[in-house]
Image: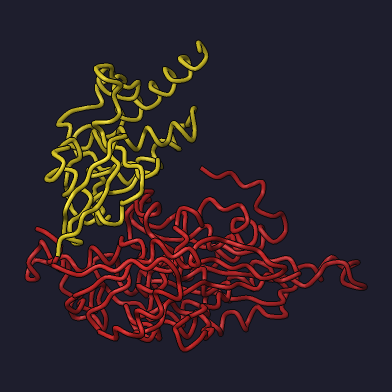
Chain colours: A red, B yellow
C-alpha cells in the first residue's frame, strides 16, 4: 500500500518556513521532521480496525494509543533542510537543543550525558537504533504521546520549548505544552524551534527508567524520570554532621504512560524539597508519586500493576539520581 | 505531481521522476530495480528496508525519496567489490547467518555501519546495534557470530595493510 497523495514543500531556512506556514494556513498541512511517527500515521492502516485492539479494555479506556485519528493530509512541509533547527549548544548555564536534532545525536552527546543525564537515558531507550537515527527530538515532543521517551525526562529537567512563528517567539514550559494525547498548544503557523534547559550550579543528578516488555521497539508500560538538586555540601555546621550535602534543594519527578499526557508529580517533588535524602524519604516520595498516577488498563499492562510499578520505578530513579549527583556519570558503563 | 529528483545510490547518479509520496524503498525497488532492499512492515518496525544514508543505517520505508536527494545512499547491491563479497557478507555465508534471507540485506548494512564505528564490538554492542533489524529464522545467534567473525577478518586485513 502506498502513502496517500500529498504535496511536498522543503524550505531552506527558518524564515522561509514560517512565511510559508503563515501564507498557507490549512489543517491539511503537516510538518515532517524525522517521519518515524508521521509517515506511519498517515499511511492507511494495514490491519482493519475491527482486528486492532488485542485487548478490549484498550478501546473502552478514556484515551487510547492512537486515539487522535490523523486528519487527511494534503501537504507535508519538511524541516530537514532548515539549518536553524539543528545542533546542541551550551551557552553559560543554558543548554539549547535544536528541534531537528536526532534522537541518536542526543544519545551520543557527551554534554547531554553529563548535564541532562535523564534525557540521555530516554534517548538511548527510544524505539530502535534505526528509529533513533531518523527520529527527531522535536518530533518526539510534538507527537505528544503520553509515553514519549524524551518527553518524560524533558519534563523532569524543566525543559522550556521555544515556539516560533512569523508573529514572533514564545516560550512554553514542557508541562504546559501537551494538552491531550497527540495534542499540543502549537498553533497552525508555529514551529518548535528548540528546547532550552537551565543548568544549575549545584550538583544535580537526573535519570529515566523505562519499564517495557522488551529492550527495543517498545512503548513503555511505565516510565519514571527524576532530577534531584542537592544543597552545597561545604557550608558550616552541615559539613560536620555530613548531612547538608544530602539535603534536597529541588526535586522534579515525571511519569510516562500513566496519564493522558506526561505527568509531573509536583506533590512528590514538594515532599522531598528541603528534606534529607535517605531510603525512607525516597520511598515516601515514591508512594506519593504512585498516588498521583492515573493509569489505564490496556494490552501492555493493567492499571493496578502500573500503579505498583510507578512506586518501584520512582524509588529506583530517585536513588539513581542521588548516586549520579554524588559521583557523576563519567564512570558509568554504557553498552 | 511528479518531480525530478537526483539520487546518488552506490556511487552512481540517478535522475528519477517521482511523486513526493514515493518512499525511498519504493524508488529503489520499483524505479531503480534495486530489489536487494526488502520491504517488510512499511512502518519502521522490521528493518528489512535498511539502507545507509550518509553512512547511517536508516529504514528506507520511512524516508521519502525526495528527502534523500543530495545524500549518499548505500544499498546491499553496493556492498560487494565487483564479484568479491565484502568480509561481512562472506562471514554471513560461512557462519550460516542466512536462512530465508529476507532480513540479510538490512542486517549486513547495519553490521557494516557498526564495524566502521567500532571495529571490535562486544556481543552486547552487536545485539544493541541490530535490535532494530528483525530476523524470524536464525534466532540471531549466528548473525551475532557472523558479525564478530567479520570484525576479526576486517581487523586482520587492516593489520596486513
Name, please, the residue furthest toward the top. Answer: B160
Q: Nearer the viewer, residue B65 or A273?
A: B65
Residue B114, quarter of the rendered image: top left
**Which of the pair A267/A194 is nearer the observer?**
A194
Which of the pair B105/A235 is nearer the observer?
Answer: B105
Q: Quadrant location of residue A97?
A: bottom right
Residue A77: x percent and y percent? 31, 70
* Residue occupying image coordinates x 27% and y 55%: B63
Q: Compared with residue B120, is residue B136 higher up or lower down, i.e. above or below?
A: below
Compared with residue A119, is residue B14 higher up or lower down, i.e. above or below? above
Q: Which residue is drawn at 32% across and 46% down?
A: B132
* Residue at x-position 50% and y-position 86%: A168
Residue B35 at x, y percent in the picture: 15, 37
* Left/right of residue A229 with respect to residue B67 in the rendered view: right
Quadrant showing the N terminus of chain A: bottom left
Left or right of residue A234, residue B12 in this image: left
x%, y% of residue B131?
34, 44
Q: Is residue B136 left or right of residue A220?
A: left
Q: Which residue lies furthest to the bottom in this view?
A: A167
Q: How many labels does the image show?
A: 0
- Compared to residue B12, the image places residue A30 above or below, namely below
Residue beneath the point at 53% across and 80% down: A288
Amino acid at each position: 500500500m502506498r502513502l496517500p497523495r500529498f504535496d511536498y514543500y522543503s524550505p531552506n531556512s527558518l524564515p522561509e518556513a514560517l512565511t510559508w506556514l503563515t501564507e498557507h494556513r490549512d489543517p491539511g498541512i503537516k510538518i515532517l521532521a524525522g517521519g518515524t511517527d508521521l509517515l506511519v500515521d498517515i499511511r492507511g492502516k494495514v490491519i482493519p480496525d475491527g482486528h486492532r485492539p488485542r485487548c478490549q479494555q484498550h478501546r473502552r479506556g478514556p484515551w487510547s494509543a492512537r486515539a487522535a485519528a490523523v486528519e487527511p493530509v494534503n501537504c507535508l512541509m519538511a524541516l530537514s533542510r532548515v539549518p536553524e533547527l539543528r545542533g546542541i549548544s551550551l551557552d553559560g548555564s543554558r543548554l539549547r537543543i535544536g528541534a531537528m536534532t536526532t534522537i541518536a545525536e542526543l544519545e551520543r552527546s557527551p554534554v547531554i550525558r553529563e548535564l541532562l543525564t535523564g534525557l540521555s537515558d530516554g534517548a538511548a531507550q527510544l524505539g530502535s537504533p534505526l528509529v533513533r537515527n531518523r527520529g527527531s527530538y522535536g518530533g518526539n515532543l510534538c507527537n505528544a504521546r503520553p509515553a514519549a521517551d524524551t518527553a518524560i525526562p524533558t519534563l523532569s529537567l524543566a525543559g522550556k520549548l521555544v515556539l516560533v512563528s512569523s508573529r514572533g517567539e514564545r516560550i512554553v514550559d514542557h508541562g504546559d505544552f501537551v494538552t491531550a494525547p497527540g495534542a499540543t498548544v502549537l498553533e497552525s503557523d508555529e514551529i518548535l524551534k528548540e528546547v532550552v534547559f537551565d543548568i544549575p550550579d549545584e550538583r544535580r543528578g537526573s535519570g529515566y527508567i523505562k519499564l517495557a516488555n522488551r529492550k527495543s521497539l517498545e512503548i513503555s508500560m511505565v516510565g519514571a524520570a527524576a532530577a534531584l538538586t542537592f544543597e552545597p555540601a561545604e557550608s558550616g555546621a552541615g559539613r560536620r554532621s555530613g548531612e547538608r550535602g544530602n539535603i534536597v534543594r529541588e526535586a522534579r519527578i515525571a511519569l510516562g504512560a500513566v496519564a493522558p499526557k506526561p505527568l509531573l508529580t509536583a506533590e512528590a517533588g514538594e515532599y522531598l524539597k528541603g528534606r534529607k535524602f535517605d531510603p525512607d524519604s525516597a520511598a515516601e516520595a515514591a508512594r506519593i508519586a504512585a498516588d498521583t498516577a492515573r493509569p489505564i488498563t490496556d494490552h501492555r499492562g493493567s492499571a493496578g500493576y502500573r500503579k505498583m510499578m510507578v512506586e518501584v520505578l520512582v524509588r529506583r530513579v530517585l536513588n539513581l539520581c542521588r548516586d549520579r549527583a554524588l559521583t557523576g556519570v563519567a564512570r558509568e558503563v554504557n553498552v | 505531481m511528479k518531480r525530478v529528483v537526483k539520487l546518488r545510490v552506490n556511487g552512481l547518479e540517478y535522475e528519477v521522476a517521482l511523486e513526493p509520496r514515493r518512499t525511498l524503498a519504493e524508488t529503489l525497488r520499483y524505479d531503480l530495480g534495486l530489489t536487494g532492499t526488502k520491504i517488510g512492515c512499511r512502518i519502521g518496525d522490521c528493518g528489512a528496508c535498511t539502507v545507509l544514508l550518509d553512512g547511517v543505517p536508516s529504514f528506507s520505508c520511512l524516508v521519502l525519496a525526495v528527502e534523500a536527494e543530495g545524500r549518499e545512499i548505500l544499498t546491499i547491491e553496493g556492498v560487494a567489490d565487483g564479484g568479491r563479497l565484502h568480509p561481512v557478507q562472506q562471514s554471513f555465508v560461512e557462519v550460516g547467518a542466512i536462512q530465508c534471507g529476507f532480513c540479510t540485506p538490512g542486517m549486513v548494512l547495519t553490521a557494516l555501519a557498526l564495524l566502521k564505528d567500532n571495529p571490535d564490538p562486544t556481543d552486547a554492542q552487536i545485539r544493541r546495534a541490530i535490535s532494530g533489524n528483525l530476523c524470524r529464522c536464525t534466532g540471531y545467534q549466528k548473525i551475532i557470530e557472523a558479525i564478530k567473525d567479520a570484525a576479526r577478518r576486517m581487523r586482520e586485513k587492516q593489520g596486513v595493510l
